[in-house]
Image: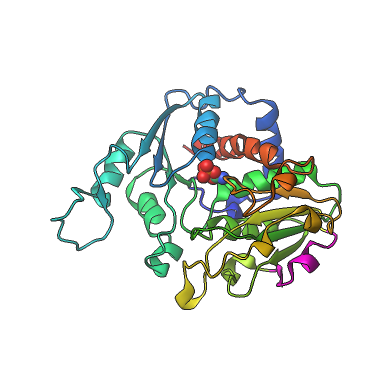
Amino acid sequence: MRHFTSVKQLGDLKEAFAKAEYVKENPFADQELGRNKTLLMLFFNSSLRTRLSTQKAAMNLGMNVIVLDVNQGAWKLETERGVIMDGDKPEHLLEAIPVMGCYCDIIGVRSFARFENKDDDYNEKILNEFIQYSGRPVFSMEAATRHPLQTFADMITIEEYRKKDRPKIVMTWAPHPKALPQAVPNSFAEGMNLMDCEFVITHPHGYELDPAFTGNARIEYDQDKAFEGADFIYAKNWAAYSGENYGKVLNMDRSWTVDSRKMALTDNAYFMHCLPVRRNMIVTDEVIESPQSIVIPEAANRVVSAQTIIKEILLSL
Ligand code: CP
C-alpha cells in the first residue's frame, strides 16, 4: 500500500482485521520498521483524536513525527491556480507540497470539504495534489469525502463487539447546528458495504448521500422503523449533499436526537459515534453514558487503525 484514501483499499477484510489484531496485541513489535523515518502530519482543520491517535501510532512504530497546523504559524496558502497573489496568502500550495515532501518520508493530510465548490470537494482536489506533487506516500486523516482511518476503527470495533454473524447496523442522521461534511457518513457507508451486515441508513428527506457511497444500503426515512432490531446504532450529522442544497443545514429537528426510547426499539444495540459529539443534539446524556455506548473503545481503536495502515505504508517504502 502506497497511498491510503479509502477503506476500499483494505483488501481482504479478514486479513485486515488479523493485521489490526496483531498491532493491538503487539503495539511495540515493529519499532525498527519506523526507525529514522519521519511522518509529517498536516492539518488544515482542527482535530483531537486523529492528531493524538495517529501520532501515538507512528511513535509505536518507532517513527519521528512532525505536526503542522497550516492555519497556525505557517504561511497562509493559496490553493487556486491562476490567482494573482496580491492578497493575504504569500505561498502557493503547489510549492509548499513538494517542499514538505523534502522533510519527511510519509505525509498524513487532514483537509475537509469547504462547501464552496462541490466538484473540488468530491474530486478531492487538495488530497490529490499532495499525492501528485509531494513525491511521498500520502494517507488521509479525513479529506473532503472520506475519513478512512475513522471507518477502519469503526469496522474493527464492530468486529470486536458483534454478537451475530450478520448484524443489523443503522447509520442515523442526527441534528447539529453547523454544516458538517459528508466524509464520515460516506466513508462509514463505504465500509459497511464491505462488511457482512444488514446496513440501513436513516435520515430526513433532503439529506440523501451520494449513491456512490451508500451502495447497497437500505434507505429508511422513518427513524423508529430503522432502529427496530438493530445491533449497532451509528449516529452522525451531515449537511445536505444534493443539488443546490449542497453544504446546507436544512433543519435541526431534535426529534431525530438518539434517545433511550429509540434505543429501546433495538436489539440492545451498541451506540457508536466518531466524536466529537454534541450531547442532547446528536445523542442524549443517558444514551452516551449507558453501558451500551462504545464511543470510547471506538476512539481507542483509532490508534490500531492508524498503526495498521502506517505499518503497511512503511513496508512499501
Ligand atoms: N473522529 C475524529 O476524527 O476526531 P477528531 O476530529 O478530533 O480528529
Position of residue 102 relative to residue 249, above or below, is: above
Examine the rendering and report whether any part of residue 14 can be seen.
no
The residue that appears at 62% across and 23% down in the rendered structure is 29
Position of residue 18 relative to residue 176, above or below, is: above
- Magenta-colored stretch includes residue 226: yes
Q: How many marks?
A: 0
Q: Nearer the viewer, residue 314 or 47?
A: 47
Farthest residue, direction bottom: 243
Q: Position of residue 120 (x, y in %)?
A: 39, 65
Q: Which residues are magenta?
A: 216-229
- Magenta-colored stretch includes residue 91: no
Q: Position of residue 179 (x, y in %)?
A: 49, 60
Q: Nearer the viewer, residue 219 or 66?
A: 219
Q: Position of residue 177 (x, y in %)?
A: 52, 58
Res 104 quadrant in image: top left
The residue that appears at 56% across and 58% down in the rendered structure is 176
Q: Position of residue 150 (x, y in %)?
A: 59, 46
The residue that appears at 51% across and 66% down in the rendered structure is 249
Examine the rendering and report whether any part of residue 249 can be seen.
yes
The residue that appears at 53% across and 61% down in the rendered structure is 182
The reply, left or right, for residue 101 in relation to residue 173 is left
Q: Nearer the viewer, residue 237 or 149?
A: 237
Position of residue 106 relative to residue 240, above or below, is: above
